[in-house]
Image (cartoon, rainbow, N blue to C red):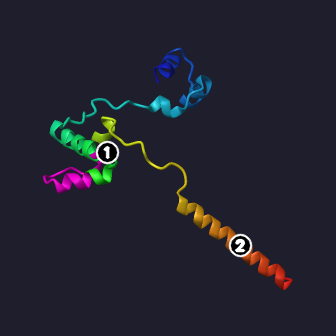
Amino acid sequence: MTLQSELKSEGKDVSIRTLCSILGIPRSTMYYKPVMNRKAIPEDGERQMEIYAIIQQYPAYALRRVRVELRRRGGKWPNRKKIHRIIKRNHWQNGNHIQGRHARARVVEQQAVRSRAHIQGSVFAKGC
């Protein structure tokens, strides 16, 4: 907006929309104000070590199982988002998850194809 005010002081009245189209930037960039003084998430060493101990003991456990184990061990624990943040921040996530489609999804798809073929065959058999 300083560019617009400089042009205005020179006697040229240019809208922000025109300036943005000339510069090739979106108008939202002109109005954007960065967020300052964001609160840092406090570190909780005891909780992190407890989560780490569970992950070391049960490497196949994901977030849900870690949360259940924390509750079994007792104590007041925060919600799953806090636990997930701790796991993510420390790169403790297990990367051994199944990618792509599951076997049962393929079976359902095959059944659907078979049923369509059966219907088409019966329609042609009747001469419709």
- Magenta segment: 67-84
Q: Is residue 105 left or right of residue 65?
A: right
Estimate the spatial distance between the alpha carbons at disc 1 and disc 2, rounded to whole Å.
Answer: 44 Å
Task: Name the residue furthest top.
Answer: 10
Q: Quadrant of residue 125?
A: bottom right
- Does the segment drawn in magenta span residue 89? no
SS at circle 2: helix
Q: Amino acid at mark 2?
A: Arg
In the picture as drawn, the residue positioned furthest to the left comes out as 75
Q: Name the residue located 73 percent from the left edge and 77 percent from the top edge.
A: 119
Sequence-first tag of 1 and 2: 1
Residue at image x 63%, y 70%?
Answer: 111
Residue beneath label 2, please? 116
Mark 2: give few (<14), some (14-19) or many (20+) Cα within 10 Å. Answer: few
Residue kind at label 1, given as amino acid type: Pro
Q: In the image, residue 89 lies at what x, y percent?
A: 31, 36
Question: In the visual, does 26 lie left or right of 53?
Answer: right
Towards the viewer: 13 or 30: 30
Mark 1 — residue?
A: 59
In the rendering, at what x and y percent does residue 38 appear?
Answer: 28, 33
Task: From this view, report whether residue 76 is shown above or below residue 17.
Answer: below
Secondary structure beneath label 1? loop
The quadrant of the image that shows the C terminus is bottom right
| 20 and 43: which is toward the camera | 43
Q: What residue occupies the far front of the structure in this picture?
A: 57
Residue 102 vs residue 34, the one in the foreground? 102
